[in-house]
Amino acid sequence: MLRSRGLVLALVVSSLAPPVTAASRSTAPFRILPGPYERKGRALGPPVGRLTLQGLTLQVEYLDREARAAFIRALDSRADDPFDSPAGRPEFYNAFRVEFDNRSTVDVTFQPGNVVLITDHEDQLSPIDLTDLYRTASLHEVSDPQQVIDRVGPLIFDLSTTIRRGERLARLLVFGPLPEKWKELRLQFSFLQIGADTHSLSFPFHKQVLTG
């Protein structure tokens, strides 16, 4: 039963992806790493972007297919990766592990809908939310769309989330396919509330093409 649920979720999520094109099939493999683009393609520093502000530490890491599946299993050992592409198709979904470690003296409020992924060509993407998944499940006549929400909900940041003082919380922000041409992108976090204070934070990432 759990396996069949995982397959239903994978089909629903993959149906949001665009069809395979010649361009997407021929794209050279690459990694997404924190920091600015380097012409020589060297990896700079650790694979995790990290900022600390007023006692709150926010870590952001891009997860490839294997890392994403491992993170999902850490949250739920019975869960399949609903964001994995069907066999024979390239990866379309881009997942970032976002972790809050609130060591401040106040609660933190995070609105995932206020996060935007912006490329160096000024393309903008918003994270996928449960409404997107429910709508797609309904359009594809899934017998129980709520099942999709119940299974995916614990894996992603969706609605307003409060991180209590002393609490640590990690979930996924998942975006659709990136545009064909880009070298750098940033995740822009707006209206992040630490107590009564509101902040905007930016995490830069770059593409490192894998050769050889």
Image (tube, rainbow, N blue to C red):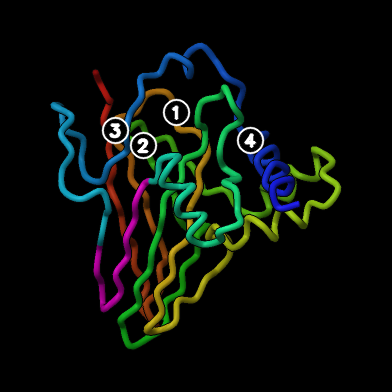
Q: Nearer the viewer, mark 2 or mark 4?
A: 4
Q: Position of residue 178 (x, y in %)?
A: 45, 32
- Highlighted range, magenta: 51-62
Mark 3 crowd level (few <14, some 14–19, many ≥20, 10 Å Cα): many
The x, y position of residue 75, in whole percent, is 51, 62
Name the amino acid type tagged 1: Pro
The residue tagged 4 is 14
Q: Amino acid at mark 3?
A: Lys
**Mark 2 / mark 1, whichever is N-terminal:** 2
Q: In which quadrant is the C terminus drawn?
A: top left
Residue receiving disc 2: 119
Query: Which quadrant of the view contains residue 181?
Result: top left
Q: Residues within 10 Å of mark 1 (few under 14, many from 20)?
A: few
> 2 or 11: nearer the eye?
2
* Residue 5 part of the magenta-drawn span: no
Front tag of 3 and 4: 4
Check disc 1 and report the residue beneath it: 179
